[in-house]
Image: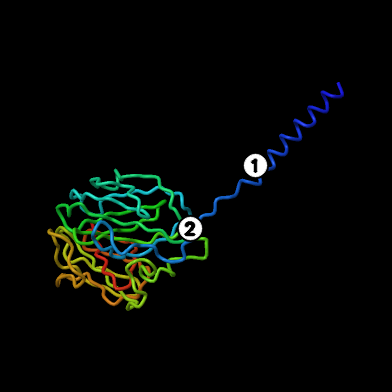
Amino acid sequence: MKSLKTLLFFILLGIAFVSCETEDDTEEVQIEVNEFSIIPNSYSGRPNNYLGCVEISSRITTIEVWDHGLIDGDIVSIIANGETIIDEQILDGPGNPIRVNYDFSFNGFNYLTLYAHNLGDVPPNTCTVSINGTEFILEANLEANGAIDVVVSGYGVTCGDSQGGNGNGNGGGNGSGIGSVVFWVAEDFGCGPITVNVQNVGSSNISAFFTTGAPDCTGNGAGGNFNNLQVGDYTFTASCSTFNWSGSFSVTEDGCLRFQLT
């Protein structure tokens, strides 16, 4: 009996030793924190145009993508940190988004890129992207992609560190500190001129509509344009005799945001 107890003692001691050794050998996986933008200069032979930055609270996300404005047959791919997460799919409306689950590789800076496979019926190719409920707009054409910084916050890094895509991306960090936005419509709503008010900036009237694509940042003489805005986030309201709109947008350094009212 004594020898059996001795044997059991050494067996239990061996199990405890192996258990402690396993715990000691198991190290917590450390996620790298990117302190600067990692947007590459180009993707698939096209330059990446920097369109802004959004902050999210978790690397683990649900990403939803749908056509922004008119559903016109846009075909897109979405690239996250160099990985194609949506591959050449046709965009539908907000009621039927393309949905993927994605775990961003880094804390701090990550990125998303929109690659356009066509221009749809109404150029350019535009889509709304939602990351865990945070929405933004990407735009691309057959000559250039649209790219955005995605910052996983809480690690001493914010969008304020992006400097318009500085780091490995296409920005220089020496820009003007200002950008532009033009509001436009693709149809005649039959309600007269549309007045757009940007909070703490002023107003502009949209007096024409564009059926063949968004205007340039002068509004092509149709109004709705706001130039020389400081980089940052803004809210707006818009109205005519029978319709009202409201929302928010971001101005990026040396960028031109074309915002369609639908």
Of residues 262 and 150, the one drawn nearer to the viewer in this rendering: 150
Q: Is 19 left, or right, of 93 in this rendering?
A: right
Instruction: State whether residue 193 is above or below residue 78.
Output: below
**Amino acid type of disc 2?**
Asn
Tell me the quadrant of the picture where the C terminus can be found: bottom left
Instruction: State whether residue 143 is above or below residue 178.
Output: above
Instruction: State whether residue 126 is above or below residue 8.
Output: below
Count residues near mark 1 (Cα–Cα under 10 Å), then give few for <14, some for 14-19, many for 20+: few
Label 2, secondary structure: give it. strand
Label 1, secondary structure: give it. helix
Residue 168's spot in the image, x, y percent? 37, 66
Earlier sequence position, callout 2 versus callout 1: 1
Separation of marks 2 and 1 at Cα, in angstroms = 28 Å
Residue 173's spot in the image, x, y percent? 37, 75
| Residue positioned 36% across, 56% down in the render | 135
**Amino acid type of disc 1?**
Thr
Q: Is 60 left, or right, of 250 in this rendering?
A: right
Q: Is 1 left, or right, of 255 in this rendering?
A: right
Tell me the quadrant of the picture where the N terminus can be found: top right
Please tell me the numbered disc located at residue 22.
1
Which image quarter: residue 140?
A: bottom left
Disc number lying in front (2 or 1): 1
Please tell me the numbered disc located at residue 72.
none
- What is the number of callouts on the image? 2
Residue 90's spot in the image, x, y percent? 23, 46
Of residues 98 and 107, the one drawn nearer to the viewer in this rendering: 107
Q: Which coloring applies here?
A: rainbow
| Residue positioned 39% across, 52% down in the render | 131
Residue beneath label 2, please?
107
Instruction: State whether residue 175 is above or below residue 119.
Output: below
Residue 186's spot in the image, x, y percent? 16, 58
